[in-house]
Image: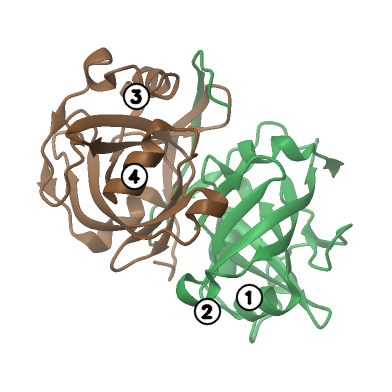
Chain colours: A brown, B green
Amino acid sequence: MKALPLPEVYALLEPGPVVLLTTARKNRPNVMTMSWHMMVEFEPPLVACICSGANYSFDALRTTGECVIAIPSRKLAATVVKVGNCSGRDTDKFKAFGLTPLPASRVRAPLIAECFANLECKVVDKRMMNRYNMFVLEVVQAWRDPKQKNPKTIHHHGYGKFVVDGAAITLKSKMR
Amino acid sequence: MKALPLPEVYALLEPGPVVLLTTARKNRPNVMTMSWHMMVEFEPPLVACICSGANYSFDALRTTGECVIAIPSRKLAATVVKVGNCSGRDTDKFKAFGLTPLPASRVRAPLIAECFANLECKVVDKRMMNRYNMFVLEVVQAWRDPKQKNPKTIHHHGYGKFVVDGAAITLKSKMR
């Protein structure tokens, strides 16, 4: 993994990819699948996400205040679904699905070696947690795997239907 | 436009498409381009979005408490960029870019005839508005154009680069 400048983080999340979210509570790493997230600010990169209180990761995120957002490409789609279909309460998902945890630099939650990008995050705002299960995260360190060129991300349409990135088009724009 | 059941709304926004957001202030319709949004709840469908205070739409959204999220397909990409590159302060964007406003049923903001889906929204939470420019919206009525079959949405990667929906894959999943 190579460090990615923080101002470039938004371009990874703004397109709406399915991501994996890792946590570590009492030194036990866990991972969940997440599609409800959005950019909130460019710099420092702030990200809002919804992590349902029914998820085992909710308490880990709430109590540790740390996580990693790992972005999988299309080749991990089957794994992403398996991760989403079971709970860390009774499954060591890293072991069960062959995901490799790597130590992060600023948080205890692990990076995922197989993902093409990893964003180390700290919870900076829990005001919307009780009402909406919403956390605001600050990305404090970002990594990108230079070996994965032009990874295609996946976008969830519900009930296991995913659309994979297709053609890229570039239009003259002033929009960042 | 045909009414779309509200429980199906999430599958439109969860994949992260670029959307258009319309408002109407003092009977003057306006439209902006937006990529920072996420689902917050399935039913009733709640959506969080970031509308920068620098946008002309911010005040319209804040004061009227209403908007429409209109979802364009790939064929509108050039228009989407033009909408994002100018301001309603000095431009009638509907006229300038050939977009057709249609009356909505529950809000004063207009639908956009050319978009394949339109979501009428009311602002239900402004607690995060001052700090993050964040609004929580409730979708109160949804519409889909049955004439646009399998529309491909676009996803913004920054500076006018968009990725168009590619192949769809379906994996056995318990995830809604």
Question: Callout 4: residue from which chain?
Answer: A
Nearest the viewer among B106 and B79 is B106
Q: Do the residues indicated by labels 2 and 1 lie within the same chain of the protein?
A: yes
Spatial CA span between label 2 and label 1 = 8 Å
Question: Callout 3: residue from which chain?
Answer: A
What residue do we see at 39% from left, 22% from top? A87
Q: Residue under label 4, please give it.
A: A61
Mark 2 Cα shell of 10 Å, populated few (<14), some (14-19), many (≥20): some
* Sequence-earlier tag: 3 or 4: 4
Spatial CA span between label 4 and label 2 = 30 Å
Q: Nearer the viewer, mark 4 or mark 2?
A: 4
Spatial CA span between label 1 and label 4 = 34 Å
- Report the side of B121 relative to A21 (left or right): right
What residue do we see at 54% from left, 18% from top? B174
Mark 1 Cα shell of 10 Å, populated few (<14), some (14-19), many (≥20): many
Dot 4: element: helix
Kind of residue at badge 1: Ser
- Report the side of B48 relative to B22 (left or right): left
Q: Residue under label 2, please give it.
A: B53
Tell me, yes or no, whether the two marked residues, 4 and 2, touch with CB atoms within 8 Å: no
Q: Where on the picture, by quarter, is residue A173?
A: bottom left
